[in-house]
Amino acid sequence: NNRALQDTLHRIDGQGYGTYREIRGTHQFEDFRLSVDKVQVDPYAPPSLMRVILEPGVVGLPAELIDDAAGRTAVSDFLTRRFAEAIGDHARSAAEAGKDSAGKGSAVSIGTPGQQVLERTSVLIAEDRIEARIAVELPASGRRIRGRQAARILTDQLPQIVDAALKHKNLDAGALAEHVRLYRDQQSLREQLGTAGLVGFVGAGAILPRRSGDSDAPLKQGAVPFIAPDSLRVSFDLPSGLSVTGMGVPEGVTVIVGGGYHGKSTLLRALERGVYSHVAGDGREWVIAREATSTIRAEDGRAVTGVDISAFISGLPSGADTRSFSSENASGSTSQAANLVEALEAGSTALLIDEDTSATNFMIRDERMRRLIADEREPITPFIDRVRPLWTQQGVSTVLVAGGSGAFFDVADQVIALDEYVPKDVTQAAGEIARSDAATGGDTDAASDAADVESAGQELIFSHDRRPRVPASTALAERGKTKPATARGRSVIQYGRERVDLAAVAQLVDAAQTQAIAHAMDRLAETFDGESSLAKAVTALLARIDDDGVDALSPHRGHPGHLARPRAQEIHAAVNRYRHLQLAGGGHR
Ligand code: ADP
Ligand code: MG
């Protein structure tokens, strides 16, 4: 307990809200320090930011769990979850005892993680200290300070929560070690995928379906556990000594087929989330994708600035140069082409594409249409003609869901059929169908053209030096922008007066990532120099996070806010969707 802080809060009870300023600074408690970094200016402002700082000995984390970055990420995630739980437990028991716990729920929060284990700012594990970064809604009645209630929250409840969540005597050492083991094993498997020639892995027994469209929790009843087909079965040895078996999704072109409602999209979505590691009990613990995997979908209406989509679209009737394509309102096909090219720019080596969220004319053009509309009149070269060169020339793999068209049989290395959620390797049968059609000159679509291009090797579509896009030094400048960019939930960044819409960015999973990306945009705006490419600038920023943690993105010293590490892909996605993005050398609109 801290008598001085309690006295201050009692003294300012009933005064104007601004007087809460007086508690800024550090307060020594029995076995932690409370650093009040930012006091909200009024009761409706975002909550006040405080750090609970403990000596490492008080928490007593086993050294072998925090001797590598993966271990620290997992321990930090574990302690964040424990802290959030302790807040909830405390609020519940206070409610049962009929005591107020600062109204509904709790005044204290730490930003509850979802199903993914992400590198977060919420708990810092440093050599000399452990810090819990919390937010506290300082209570008011009207605009007057409720000092006695604030004292109960900060000098009574908070120490109890800290005690339950962070003190060594209450630490569940077994659960902690298990959390770290799982995460290290998952990270190791993700790193092993490349050498194994795989883009992804789905463990036998995995539960892929989710409870509902707006829940990331596993489906409770009737979920069919994943079964790996024999021909695609692989095993991995993990650092803990365990090994896992499941389906390997090989590099190259993989097509997922099957009747409607047989689980195709669910499998693809699980792979899409496989770029992150999931907590025990999620069902997707062993669904792992390579880090640089991007979902590519149509997103009509998005803004595009200076993207070279000429591999897919050229000779638009408007005469627009698609080697530097800009639009304030891209169509289904141009937006999907831009999403794909931007993903390559961000370094992606595997693409995930679902027919449900694709523009049909971007994906395929059938033989009849090719006969009616001459190729020269059609600006779009469909993805089916590009998917092989993407792999053979660029080393970029594709996993594609196509239940509605067999056209992709011609270009697939693997075809996986889902039958009532059970995958079967039907590569051979699909290949036979494709070959027999080609022999009879039947409905081959244009895939044979694609094969021709590949075998002749004449057209190097993706290997010419694509001009990297270079943001102007004013790339993200908005006149009159004075406030830092901020996240509004998971899917929107308020950037000056501009709203950057990230609703279609499928692998952005946590509002704390969005907030980190908002800061990243501000940091990038400071570093764009009109000389180096967007990809370089983002890489440099991520290197800084490697060195200094996600804290490095925050504009403040002390409490950085609740941030989680974003991938390069999602940072690119946000910059690319900014409607006033400017490129050096006139790539802007
Ligand atoms: P498709 O893309 O083949 O049309 P979806 O992936 O959308 O099918 O799945 C259809 C429905 O089946 C969804 O409600 C999904 O949650 C459910 N589902 C998917 N996989 C499983 C599974 N393994 N067990 C039980 N239900 C599943
Ligand atoms: Mg589907």
Image: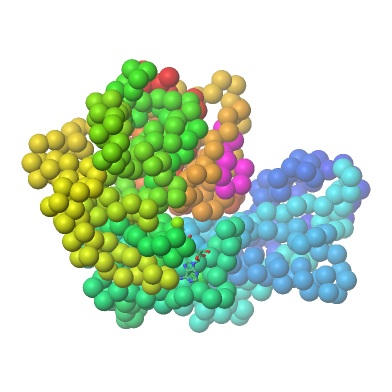
Where's residue 501, x and y in %? 54, 38
Q: Quadrant of the C terminus?
A: top left
Q: Which of the two residues, 34 or 291, is positioned nearer the viewer here?
A: 291
Image side of residue 307 versus residue 581, left or right? left
Viewer-side residue, 116 vs 267: 267
Answer above or below: position of 379 versus 290: above
* Residue 552 visible in the shown view: no
Residue lying at 24% horizontally and 55% vertically, measured from the top left:
409
* Residue at the image position 30 percent from the left and 64 percent from the top: 416
Q: Nearer the viewer, residue 548 or 183?
A: 183
Residue 266 shown in magenta? no
Residue visible at 61% across and 80% down? 169
Q: Residue furthest right?
A: 14
Using the image, determine if residue 583 lies above or below residue 570: above
- Provide the residue span drawn in magenta: 488-495
Is residue 491 in the magenta section? yes
In this rendering, would 565 be left or right of 135? left
| Residue 405 located left or right of residue 49 | left
Q: Going 32% across and 55% down the picture, which residue do you hit?
A: 399
Give the image location of residue 352, x and y in percent: 36, 52
Q: Is residue 89 visible?
A: yes
Residue at the left extreme, as displayed? 456
Could you tell me which quadrant the N terminus lies in?
bottom right
Up the image or down, 131 lies above or below 339; here it is below
